[in-house]
Image: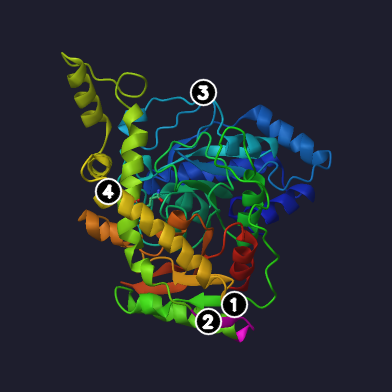
Amino acid sequence: MTKPNEMTIVEAARALRARELTVRELWNACAETAHAKNPELNAYLEIFDADESAIDTAQKRINAGDESLLCGIPLAIKDNILIEGKIASAASKMLENYKATYDATVIKKLKDAGALFLGRTNMDEFAMGSSTEHSAFGPTKNPHDTSRVPGGSSGGSAVAVVANLCIAALGSDTGGSVRQPAAHTGIVGLKPTYGAVSRSGLIAMGSSLDQIGPLAKSVEDTRILYETIRGIDPLDSTTIPENLYGVLAPPKRLRVGVPRHLFTEGVDKDVLATFNTTLEKLAGAGHTLVDVELPMSSHALAAYYVIMPAEVSTNLARLDGIRYGLGVRGDTLLEDYIQSRTEGFGEETRRRILLGTFVLSSGYIDAYYKKADAARAVLRQEYTDAFKKADVIAFPTTPSPAFKFGEKSDPLTMYLEDIFTVTANLTGMPAISIPMGFVEREGKKLPVGIHFTAPHQSENSLFAVGEAV
Ligand code: GLN
């Protein structure tokens, strides 16, 4: 029999109802593995003590025939999502001791569903990064090869899932942070349509880009989590009603758009070969491959690295050493600010605050920020047009498999990792990464992912193509 902590949500929910497993046993299996493996992997920044009353209530609900599939399921939560009474540090010295005073809306919804929280997971500081090397509390390791990164910024959540230190997890995705670590660890990761999931209680990075998304062992588990956490929320005015975009059910035979002109350079040849094989299999299963042109896509990364830091600089301005978070006292108010922010923020965070402040400053806002914002509108139109021919558009999730620690020390090389993921955040469209196989490096098998984007609120098309893969 599969060990309890190795189960999917669906398998665990079935075993709990068949009385083959108790909530307590499931919790213990996850917690014991988490405690045993975390010293090496550093997936969790904190593993929580068992909440006896929550475990008890979940068991009672199951005994009474409650149908919520998440009831009694231990989940891992990225350290930038607030759980009342728990620290939420966003892996930063700045918020090292910050205790959340309320539940994020997604947490409230999961609690209502009876889910349990196993711990808070490591990440790049304030979700800025593609490797989880920018955490103030040390990097997370990829269990497929511990000399390599798990991807980021939700690397801790991805590793907690793939190493069976929980059943499933939540991450946040501003430019790929759910999908990219999902690809590098071999699991499923979804970035929902912008506004589908409430951002209330998510520590903001780029407010017009951020979405909370599930990381899970299967497409079905991803769907279950997504269905539970989504919905309009009075606490987040950017959340959208159920069917704002008039979505239809996905067709049986999907039209898969492939922008081949974007893969002519910069994509690892083994990744590209796996991608092509996956597409051929989809075609073999009756789906249609269609060529699509997305000429503006080559500017997406540049637009992202203007818009995102602009929003970062604004969002992190509140961490001034006075109101909350780390406060280091100098002789003057200015010194208070400078010392708190210098000690509180890591190098990458400071770099982005500087960049963001620059692109928003008078004299440069037109040249940079407004131009990037205009590019964003064009990109959205380009995708909308492409979706007249295709139900989903396919990319490799990342240009290469998981890299080694320290390999991408130049920030620009690291930023290139996001080339295929940022567009979905800029356009607000949903996107998913699905494991598509392995490539071999130094005798180790490294997972790689295929990425699909769909029109706004067409998550069902992503689940359909995900199941097909
Ligand atoms: N890797 C991207 C960045 O560093 C995306 C981060 C994210 O999605 N939170 O900005």
CB within 8 Å, label 2 to label 3 = no
Q: Report the Cα–Cα distance between label 2 and label 1.
A: 7 Å
Q: Residue at 64% across / 68% down in the picture? A: 464
CB within 8 Å, label 3 to label 4 = no
Residue range (magenta): 284-291
Asked if 97 appears above or below 2 in the picture, the reply is: above
In the depicted view, which residue is nearer to us: 20 or 79? Answer: 79
In the image, is the residue at mark 1 within 8 Å of ligand 1 by its beta carbon?
A: no
- Farthest residue in the left direction? 331
Let me know if residue 290 is in the magenta part: yes
Provide the residue designation for mark 4. 366
Identify the amino acid type marked 4: Asp
**Neighbour class for label 2 at 10 Å: few (<14), some, many (≥20)?**
some
Find residue 92 and report its horizontal and vertical position in percent: 33, 35
Provide the residue designation for mark 1. 255
- Circle on res. 376: none
Q: Residue at 38% across / 67% down in the picture? A: 297
Asked if 109 appears above or below 325 in the picture, the reply is: below
Asked if 290 appears above or below 236 in the picture, the reply is: below
- Circle on res. 101: 3
- Is residue 285 something that shows in the picture? yes
